[in-house]
């Protein structure tokens, strides 16, 4: 089912540089009230001019007075990070949605955390939770250079080099995934966040691990690509509305449904926030999101209409809209 939205106005209390190309935003409520309790792995939407972007929360879960996110400056992006880095100033008011959690930390005796670049952000509260619970854990954190790796110094100083393994690529090479993942470890969960190439390799190494051991979060569902075979037109029957719409090549289900006058709650339109998840009544889905679990996708009971399509050879879908 579609996940609920909790929209509110916040104030940017502090904007600070955490590493080369990375700023941290500290947000608070205008009336200084506390935020709702959230869990490690949660994210918020930042509603920016002409953009809505999702950012993982990296502040301490126990401090409900603030929310913090860290943003990488990506000049080739569609403008969200550029606006944050170049135009957003302390004291500004922003609208946020959430927090929501599509990357929850499950209880385990042991954890291996793997982060690539800005993928360290959702891992920070997870490490704090694992440490507070007395669990065994290690972090493998890679980046282009030491200066580009936000929180690297802080993590190493706080937890020590035995637990925090840093891999600046220019001096140490890439993360030793063979050494970390080559042999499955009993009662250990793997949490990985970063760019698609890193996560693809992690997934390959974890093929022999127990089912459910690996948990990943992609920066963008577009990196998933989809099968490509379903890039063909299909029909969508909107059961509740009593209409059928055509979804041509190059248009999403969400766009086609909106053009037909049916409102669907949505946010990121990239398959990473889960807002536009709707029940599927009939049809086979080519899932292209980064939200649903493998079990959810296999069940075929819901889909994210902003990115997913009918599977190859499936001429029509029926949705509860």
Image: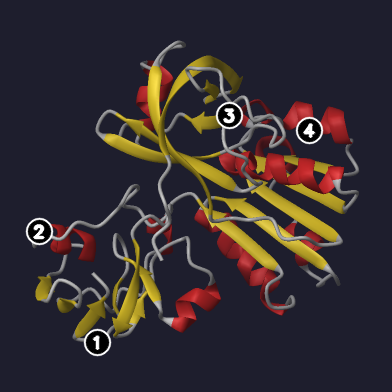
Say whether disc 3 or disc 2 marks the residue closer to the N-terminus.
3
Residue at the image point whose x is 29% and y is 79% from the top: 229
Tell me which label, 4 or 3, sits earlier in the chain. Answer: 3
- Does label 1 or label 4 sit earlier along the sequence? 4
Q: Is residue 12 above or below residue 132?
A: above
Of circles 3 and 2, the one toward us is: 2
Q: Can residue 178 be seen?
A: no
> Which numbered disc, 2 or 1, marks the residue that appears first in the sequence?
2
Q: Nearer the viewer, residue 49 or 150?
A: 49
How far across and down, in percent of the image, does residue 292 sit?
48, 67
What is the spatial separation of the Cα atoms under label 3 and label 2, in whole angstroms? Answer: 37 Å
* Direction from residue 109 to residue 84 in the image, left or right: left
In front: label 3 or label 1: 3
> Would you call the spot at circle 4 few (<14 residues within 10 Å), some (14-19), or many (20 or more)?
some
Left or right for 55, reference 179: left
Residue on which disc 3 sits: 68
Task: Tell me whether the residue at label 4 lies in contact with that at label 3, contact meaning CB atoms closer than 8 angstroms.
Answer: no
Q: Which residue is mark 1?
A: 314
Q: Residue at x 27, y 74 (%)?
A: 320
Secondary structure at numbered mark 1: loop
SS under mark 4: helix
* For marks 3 and 1 on the same chain, the one whose residue lies earlier in the sequence: 3
Inter-mark Cα distance, 2 to 1: 24 Å
Measuring 52% from the left and 43% from the top, which residue is drawn there?
43
At horizontal 74% and vertical 78% (from top left) the residue drawn is 210
First along the sequence among labels 2 and 4: 4
């Amino acid at each position: 089912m579609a996940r609920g939205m909790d929209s509110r106005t916040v104030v940017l209390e502090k904007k600070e540089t955490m590493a080369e190309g990375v700023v941290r935003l500290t947000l608070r409520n205008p009336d200084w009230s506390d935020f709702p309790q959230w869990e490690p792995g949660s994210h918020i939407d930042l509603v920016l001019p002409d953009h809505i972007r999702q950012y993982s929360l990296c502040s301490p879960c126990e401090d409900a007075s603030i929310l913090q996110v860290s943003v990488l400056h990506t000049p080739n992006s569609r403008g969200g990070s550029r606006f944050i880095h170049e135009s957003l100033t302390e004291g500004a008011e922003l609208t946020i949605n959430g927090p929501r959690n599509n990357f929850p930390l499950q209880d385990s005796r042991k954890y291996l955390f793997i982060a690539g670049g800005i993928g360290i952000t959702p891992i920070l509260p997870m490490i704090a939770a694992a440490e507070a619970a007395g669990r065994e854990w290690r972090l493998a954190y890679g980046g282009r250079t030491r200066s580009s790796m936000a929180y690297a110094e802080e993590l190493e100083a706080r937890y020590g080099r035995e637990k925090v393994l840093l891999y600046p690529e220019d001096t140490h090479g890439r993360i030793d995934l063979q050494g970390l993942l080559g042999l499955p470890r009993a009662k250990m969960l793997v949490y990985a966040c970063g760019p698609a190439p890193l996560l693809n390799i992690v997934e390959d190494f974890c093929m022999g691990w127990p089912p459910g051991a690996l948990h990943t979060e992609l920066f963008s569902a577009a990196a998933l690509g989809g099968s490509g075979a379903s890039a063909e037109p299909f029909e969508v029957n909107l059961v509740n509305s009593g209409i059928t719409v055509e979804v041509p090549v190059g248009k999403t289900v969400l766009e086609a449904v909106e053009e037909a006058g049916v409102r669907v709650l949505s946010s990121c339109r990239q398959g990473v926030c889960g807002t536009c998840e709707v029940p599927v009544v009939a049809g086979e889905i080519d899932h292209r999101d980064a939200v649903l679990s493998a079990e959810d996708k296999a069940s075929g009971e819901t889909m994210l209409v902003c990115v997913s399509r009918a599977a190859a050879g499936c001429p029509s879908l029926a949705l509860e809209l």
